Amino acid sequence: MNAQGSRGTRGPHPDPAHTAQTVHTTHTAQTTPDREPDPRFTLANERTFLTWLSTSLALSAGGVAMAAVPAASFTPWLRMVMAIVLVMLAAVAAGMAYPRWRRVQHALRTARPLPPPALAAVFGYGVAAVAVLALVLILLAL
């Protein structure tokens, strides 16, 4: 400890109210239409875009794998329903990735609230439905 009672710093601890204000202003996207947003927010938006594309590839691979399962293994019509749902979810994820990126980027540049993730429920319920169907297929195969 130093003479002011703090560890490893020069001088006393800063005023908590000042620290909260500083943290708030440094982590808020302070942009105007003619200024670039903080690169961290832009890069996070880009990572989210790429994650949607990765999710699309995974869903597509799952759909193709389900369609390739031998007909004798599971009920054919149920297996095809699962494959179709997975591939449709993949198409929606890929198709909506860029428009979502563009809307979020526009909101960052104009300092507006971010748009809500409108398709999150579709993907959540879609994947849950496929999981339940897969469980049914597995139990029927026993």
Image: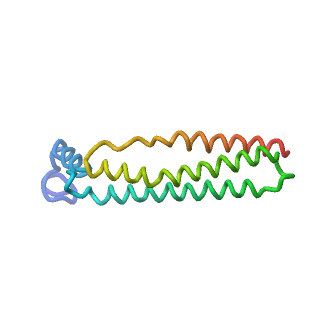
Q: Nearer the viewer, residue 100 or 11?
A: 100
Residue at (62%, 44%) from the top-left corner?
Answer: 127
| Residue 52 image position (x, y, % from top left) | 50, 54
| Quarter placement of the C terminus | top right
How many marks overall?
Answer: 0
- Position above or below: 59 against 114: below
| Residue 21 image position (x, y, % from top left) | 19, 45
Residue at (37%, 49%) from the top-left corner?
Answer: 103
- Position above or below: 55 against 136: below
Give the colouring mode of the picture.
rainbow
Residue at (56%, 42%) from the top-left corner?
Answer: 124
| Residue 125 image position (x, y, % from top left) | 59, 39
In this image, 14 relative to 142: left or right? left
| Quarter placement of the N terminus | bottom left
In this image, 5 relative to 71: left or right? left
In this image, 46 relative to 63: left or right? left
- Position above or below: 58 against 22: below
| Residue 19 image position (x, y, % from top left) | 19, 47
In this image, 83 relative to 120: left or right? right
Q: Nearer the viewer, residue 42 or 19?
A: 42
**Residue 41 occupies quadrant:** bottom left
